Amino acid sequence: MKKNFKIVVIGFNAGYVKYILSQLGVNEDVLLINNSLFVANEFPDFPFYHLKSNDIPWYISDSFSCDLLLVDSSLGINVEDISFKHLEFVHVDTLGSEIKIFNKNILLPPLDFETRNIEGLEVGNILVTSVSDKVPLIRSIREATLGFMEGIKIYGIDLHHDPVSKYFLDGFYQQKSKGELFINEVLEICVRNSIKHIIPTRDGELEFFSKNKAVFNNEGIDIFVSELSVIETCLDKLKFFNVLGAYFDEIIPTFSDSESFSDNDVIVVKERLGAGSHNLMLGVHKTSFEQEKFESPIFQPHIEGEEFSIDSYYDGDFLISCCRRRTLVKNGESQITEEVMNDEFQKIVQDIIKKFNIKGHSVFQAIIDSNEKIHIIECNSRFGGASSFSVAAGVDTFTYYLFRYYFKKMFTPFYKSDEILLKQVRYKNDMILSAKG
């Protein structure tokens, strides 16, 4: 259902918005749409949508209506694309002149009191590890950083000397060491490039960075990673069942041997540690699986049904989630995914997140059978391969993380209407560059 506002303000700096609203005598029922997070900081109680480009997504413009639409003409937004009827529309392009709004004469001052920064706020650059081909992740981070108007740079590091993501970064380093030496290598990169944030992206390094979080924190560098106990539980499928299953019946039963199953039971065999799609045998019997293919196998009942994921962001206070159907899955990642409304699944996941304090971004995966019973398979405590979809659906993880880090609070996000359900199709794309340099 669309939400109606008295005024929707698109663009302008915080000082200008404050002036206009004070002149109109309006202090509620206002939606702010802006590319600057400093505006969200000044008005934390107003619903706020972080504009990532000069185009308002259709699923946002279709989610609100208003009596007055006030637009900063310098953004170049085509308001004809905003598909709703409004009583008044003011396209502000003449500063220092007087206009009439709601039958009030308002003097528009020149924009000589820009408020893009606040005293004492020094933003830092970002390092993304194991960048590989994670271009959607880097783009999601990039869009979040635009809200600070400070030219935050994104650097990457990877074992490979020429990964795909390298061409979407502001700087790249090939990883040369491991263990304790890797700590020193990363610290040197951070100091050299004024990096204040590290975002690990691979399961195998989450534990490493969480263990060494204090080392980086002492140097003024924040690691976007969950607590070590959470990571260890999520990476170990047997522990995941033993710990979470003690409180939530929806966690799929998991065993270290096959003795709990009969010879006729259809089961799933996986590696106990690592990604769920790695070394996986589906729909086999315990007498037919090949033990020698596994380092440390675990056994689960085979469940027929549809695959679903829930992406969430949690910072200990603010929690938001979105549920999606994994329509087409290749190599463990969703190629086609559709948003769905499943309040039961979402409530269970949010209860788990709060109980076990799973901070940052998480992706819960489940199978829902023909009887609508939920079987939670695993939780990845990081941004997933198709998690960029969740940003459009409202789980704008990196915007929320950076805002909380710098402003020590959370704004009031404006989300699309629940009646609008999104679908994502992931596909390969090409980029042509000069072969020189």
Image (cartoon, rainbow, N blue to C red):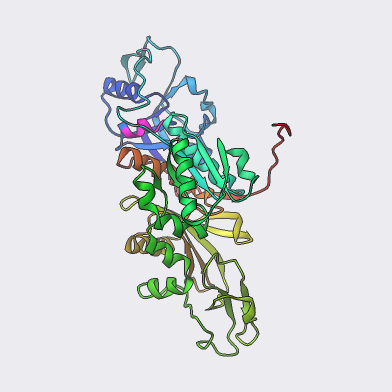
Residue 377 falls inside the magenta stretch: no
Q: Position of residue 111 (x, y in %)?
A: 38, 15
Query: Which residue is most to the bottom?
Result: 263
> Most prominent secondary structure in the magenta stretch?
helix
Q: Position of residue 352 (x, y in %)?
A: 37, 64
Residue at 49%, 43% (x, y): give it: 127
Q: Which corner quadrant holds the N terminus?
A: top left
Toward which corner of the image does residue 70 lie, by quadrant?
top left
Q: Which stretch is magenta?
A: 36-41
Query: Which residue is most to the right?
Result: 435
Toward which corner of the image does residue 16 lie, by quadrant?
top left
Q: Which corner quadrant holds the C terminus?
A: top right
Compared to 369, does 60 lie above or below?
above
Compared to 312, does 77 lie above or below?
above
Residue 280 visible to an observer of this rendering: yes
Residue at 47%, 69% (x, y): give it: 236
Q: Nearer the viewer, residue 212 or 323?
A: 212
Compared to 388, does 30 lie above or below?
above
Residue 39 falls inside the magenta stretch: yes
Q: Is residue 157 rendered to the left or right of residue 289? A: left
